[in-house]
Amino acid sequence: MVYLGCHLSCGKGFRAMVRTAESIGADTFAYFTRNPRGSKGKDPDKGDIAAALAELKEQGFGKLVAHGAYTMNLCAADPEARSFTASILADDLRRMADLPGQLYNFHPGSHVGQGTEIAVEQIASALKTALEPDYPVTVLLETMAGKGSEVGGRFEELRAILDAVNDPRMGVCLDTCHVYDAGYDIREDLDGVLAEFDRIIGLDRLYALHLNDSKNPMGSHKDRHEKIGQGSLGTETFRKIVTHPKLQGKPMILETPNELPGYQQEIALLRSFTEK
């Protein structure tokens, strides 16, 4: 089986997110740990979290996927900016300890001219510092479109970070728009791309997916999401993904340009592909 959901607002707390997810037919969801375009974050209410975790278990939800702020850049050229981002990461993972067993996903960053090798070292250093030994969280590097000096547009770059961190709590979240825009042809050769991912990173390190169609053709390096079936990937690609035997049991999060009613329709569509 697959777990399907979308990004939800955490403004009213975790239990409210669970109830919203249930109302649109989702059995997982993603949320931002803080303002996605800023740095503000607040400690969640532990009673609210306990109630939400109990309901998640009762309703058979898959793992949740927390998302770091878009402004995080662990390989920024400016040392102060890099240090500030590292402190945000450390704070996020500290708070994720209240949600044992869940997933934390973030964009690796952009090296802004320093080069990929230096960026890998900087990203890995921040992760090794932030991942305290007792934190029960899996941290995911997101596959990126490879625009500009973005790190993570190639599987080899993600593998380099994983090797440098060398922690079993590290994994990958595969974004369908990003990998297609990066040049991986999941539309015509999904099996081939998964085989390449397995050879370079290992499918055992793939913990979650972002399901997004793309406004642009393969290899465009643009990163512009589209609604399911309305972009260059097309509906059939997502039928293959949600029914693929090697992708079962993983949370699949929609990040399409939608509001809740649109997400509800997309979840229903994707779930219909899995019904025999």
Image (tube, helix red, strand yellow):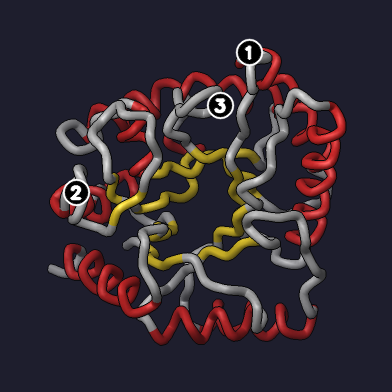
Q: Nearer the viewer, mark 2 or mark 3?
A: 3
Question: Gap in Å between the C-alphas at discs 3 and 1?
Answer: 9 Å
Q: Which residue is found at the position 19% from the left and 38% from the top?
A: 187
Question: Whole-percent x and y of residue 83?
Answer: 85, 35
Q: Which residue is mark 3?
A: 151
Residue 115 image label:
1
Q: In the image shown, does 126 or 110 lie closer to the viewer?
A: 110
Question: Gap in Å between the C-alphas at discs 2 and 3?
Answer: 27 Å
Residue 276 image label:
none
Instruction: Specify whether 30 is left or right of 193.
Output: right
Residue 240 image label:
2
Q: Which residue is found at the position 49% from the left and 47% from the top?
A: 207
Q: Which residue is found at the position 72% from the left and 84% from the top?
A: 48
Q: Amino acid at mark 1?
A: Gly
Question: Whole-percent x and y of residue 218?
Answer: 25, 31
Instruction: Specify whether 188 is left or right of 111.
Output: left
